[in-house]
Amino acid sequence: MIDMNNSRTALPDIDKTWTLFLDRDGVINEDVVGDYVKRREEFIFREGTLSALQILKPLFARIIIVSNQRGVEKGLMTPNDLEDITAFMLSTIQQSGGNIDQVFYCTSIQNEDPNRKPNIGMALQAQSLFPEINFSKSIMVGNMPGDMLFGKGIGAFTVYLPTRPEEIPKENTVDAVYKDLLAFANDLIGKTE
């Protein structure tokens, strides 16, 4: 059983060559359980996220968002809606001193789509764009079982944020547990000082 209150494994010793992969909904912004963030007005940053991204920026070579967004292919939102949400998210993060190097989305409703997490297609896209990415020197932070499987699929250190108690990953896919991105960032900076 996963201990939802504590990190279980010491965080790796990272340096500026590491990559941080982040899920979006439930990690960066508030998750809408049973629905999707369909418009900019519905995108609400989770408490502490902007501070966390400011802390994390100088610690990693790349910070990359990898997010399943099947609401597009379901017709619940348009690609333009997704672009609008992304532009708002990125500009707000930048204005508060953080940075996201790239955002990858999979809008497919097909689970076998190579880019849909837990499949690793979005990580391969990231590595194609940034060839210096070494998956064994990466951390994946997410709030869903598929995020943890994605992380394990590329050989990353996995960090689970338990924001969806109805969606608990298998214990062997989780390396560490934090209540939110800020708790993770504070612990990580404590290791690098």
Image (cartoon, rainbow, N blue to C red):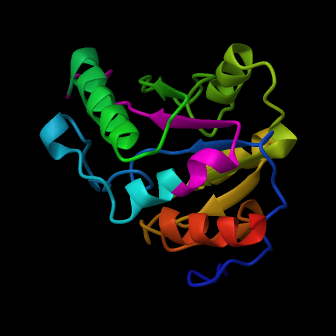
Report the span colored magenta. 55-76
> Could you say which quadrant of the image residue 86 lies in?
top left
Determine the residue positioned at 55% across, 57% down: 55
Above or below: residue 19 compared with residue 3: above
Seen from the viewer's position, the closer of residues 21 and 98 is 98
Specify whether 154 is left or right of 81: right
Determine the residue positioned at 83% across, 44% down: 137
Above or below: residue 20 compared with residue 51: above
Q: Point out residue 92 in the picture as x, y percentages from the top left corner.
A: 30, 40
Q: Point out residue 158 in the picture as x, y percentages from the top left corner.
A: 70, 57
Q: Which image quarter is the C terminus in?
A: bottom right
Determine the residue positioned at 54% across, 72% down: 183
Q: Is residue 74 visible?
A: no
Inspect the magenta stretch and tell me whether residue 42 lies in it. no
Specify whether 64 is left or right of 34: right
Seen from the viewer's position, the closer of residues 78 and 93 is 93
Q: Which image quarter is the N terminus in?
A: bottom right
Q: Point out residue 93 in the picture as x, y percentages from the top left corner.
A: 38, 42
